[in-house]
Amino acid sequence: MRVLTRLRLPIFALLLATAALTSGSILQAAAAPRALDKEAQVAAFLARQRTEAVPLYRVLDVRSVPQQCGNYCGPATILEALAYSGVQTSQTQLAQLAGTPGCGINAIGTCISAIRTVLNQRYQNLPEPGWFRSAPLRNAEEYWGMTGVAVAEHGVPVGNLLNPNPADGSPYCLPTWCNTTASSVHFVLTSGVSGTYDGSDRAASVYYVDSATGQHLGDAAGMNGWWTSVNGMANVIAANNGYGGCDGINAIVW
Amino acid sequence: MGTAAVTASTPLSGSTGRRFTLLSVLLVVLASCSEGGVKITPVSQQPATPERTATRMARATPAPTPRLPAIAVQSFRPAGGYTSMIADRRGVYWLGGGVPLQAVVMGAAQTGEGERVLARPLRDGEAVGRPLPAGEWLLFPETQDTNAAGGPWRVRAVHLSSGRERIVDGAQDGWDGLSLAVAGARAAYTVGVGSGVEVASEVRLWDTGTEEPRTVLRTAPGVTLQRIAFDGRAAAAVRTTRLPDGAVATDVVELDLSAGRLLPLPAQNATMPGIAPRWIVWVTIPVGGTANQLVLFDRERRTTRVIADSGQGHSLHNPSISGNLVTWNSSDTSAIALYDAEQRAGFVIDQGVVGKVWIHEGVLVWTALNAATRAYELKVGTLSLTP
């Protein structure tokens, strides 16, 4: 019995001392969250949505910017996000920063990792340093969680690499693309959320702005935003499966 | 798909001689047109206001029940993927493709029999629009590469019987490349001309197989036309105008092709027009996340009416029209509606996970999730337009 007491006291004292020594770093960790924090926020968001089922509605005042070149959807999307955060820059400058090749026939686009990096470097007043991450999309509910946390709770838009009109037999296409090509690779920015996700197409949707303009799209600059269901957006992202993003199956910058 | 906001109103003459509008009954199942497993029901109507209720009570005889022409529906599952579908009484056509790029133009009978590749893009090309049947030809727009800055645009055509192909026309580089529409055996298309702030659009007509294309309209510099729709005589298109301050304005205009002039419409901030001899339809652009509306314009009376509203958090898009019948798509893909502009009545033609609906010359095509197999299938609905 005595032995045990002797052992317990030093252990208890050791724990106290350890806690005192590490409290500073714990606080620092809270200020600079670990990578797991956004996942936890998504899980908490979805849990609240399932139990409370309170419909959301938030649309950020993000303006679409017409892309200067056929392969500049990446720089134009970065510009849309940065302009919303108060940063003035140009597509040309962002294309240089992101390593987008010059515009021309058969020119390739912008890598996901470059979009993420430029956003983290230039976006003003991020909720936390290094906020933007790239991730694959596992399911539509997860997408609802990502956009709910980013757009609704923190006021930060979400980037999406997708095929806007996939030839997959589904009823899903981005509205301005439904009459057009079956095999484009494109990047758009989600800036709004509405509803509460229950698995159906009707219940929850996202608002996105699109930099693409032109003859087959027919929408002028600054007006190119539309709603699509969460299932629909998740479907056009999944149909592309990260193709053209040079980052495996990663397709979301959030 | 915003069906709860679809209205069906019938103009009546009241006992006082005033002209009233009666919003007709709530969600009545017609059940008269159910073929191929598709139940046709009128969509729900707006609730009656007191004035409308009084009007209805004063009326001695009930309004005729709106009826949709019989519709024969066939469905099949194409072997490959599909999107941007269209059908006529001979067959169904669509874009197939995927990753990597290279969309191809496909076709089959309405039953799905004889599915085959009808046309492939030229080298480094890409079919960039819905294939359109016109007479003996199937037309589609193509560009060398959709990732390019427009690229060289072409109007391609393939003869449906012989398989012979031809390049109808070409357009220069640039995002104002071309848009294409057909009616009967005629095609109308826009092509970009000029460059920079001087860019303009020309509208050209092609009577398929009988003559070479001819230019019938050219816009002023700084004004371009996109998303053309065509009824065989007149057309409608989205007009983009570069303003002196550098801003851009968008509206839908009617095109008088015989006089070569643009006729303004009450359609500011509007897009995606469709046109029929009596009507023009378009959707408003949901700027800033607002709800948007499907608007019907009566070309004879020069009046408009909203026939559907997306409601908050959804968008209506890509309407199409054939005769008096209008259909459209929505971000809410739980139902597909068909609106009869003459009867002022809407009907639900399919429910579930459904979308990408298009109507052309009395034939509907859409995609639907088969609840039993959990697989998507393509549906073709041919309307009986004669009594």
Image: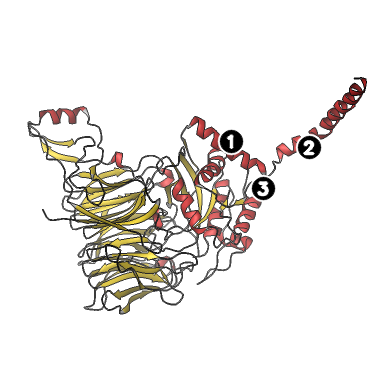
- The picture places residue B295, in percent across and down from the top left corner, at 27, 48
For disc 3, the neighbor class at 10 Å (few under 14, some 14 to 19, many from 20) is some
Kindly tell me whether residue B327 is visible in this rendering: yes
B319 in relation to B157, above or below: above
Residue mark closest to the camera, 3 vs 1: 1
- The picture places residue A69, in percent across and down from the top left corner, at 50, 65
- Quarter of the figure with residue B311: top left
- The picture places residue B56, in percent across and down from the top left corner, at 14, 31
Residue at figure coordinates x 19%, y 65% from the top left: B233
Q: What kind of residue is marked 3?
A: Gly
Mark 3 or mark 2: name the one nearer the start of the chain: 2
Q: What chain does mark 3 sit on?
A: A
Q: What kind of residue is marked 2?
A: Ser
Q: Are marks 3 and 2 on the same chain?
A: yes
Residue mark closest to the camera, 1 vs 2: 1
Residue behind mark 2: A25
- Camera-side residue of B88 and A175: B88
Q: Alpha-carbon distance for marks 3 and 2?
A: 19 Å
Residue behind mark 1: A44
Residue at figure coordinates x 50%, y 30% from the top left: A52
Residue behind mark 3: A130
Q: Alpha-carbon distance for marks 1 and 2?
A: 24 Å
Disc 2 secondary structure class = helix
Q: Is residue B177 left or right of residue A78?
A: left
Disc 1 secondary structure class = helix
- Camera-side residue of A102 and B208: B208
Q: Quadrant of the N terminus of chain A?
A: top right
- The picture places residue B260, in percent across and down from the top left corner, at 24, 67
Residue at figure coordinates x 87%, y 25% from the top left: A8
Q: What chain does mark 1 sit on?
A: A
- Quarter of the figure with residue B290: top left
Q: What kind of residue is marked 1?
A: Ala
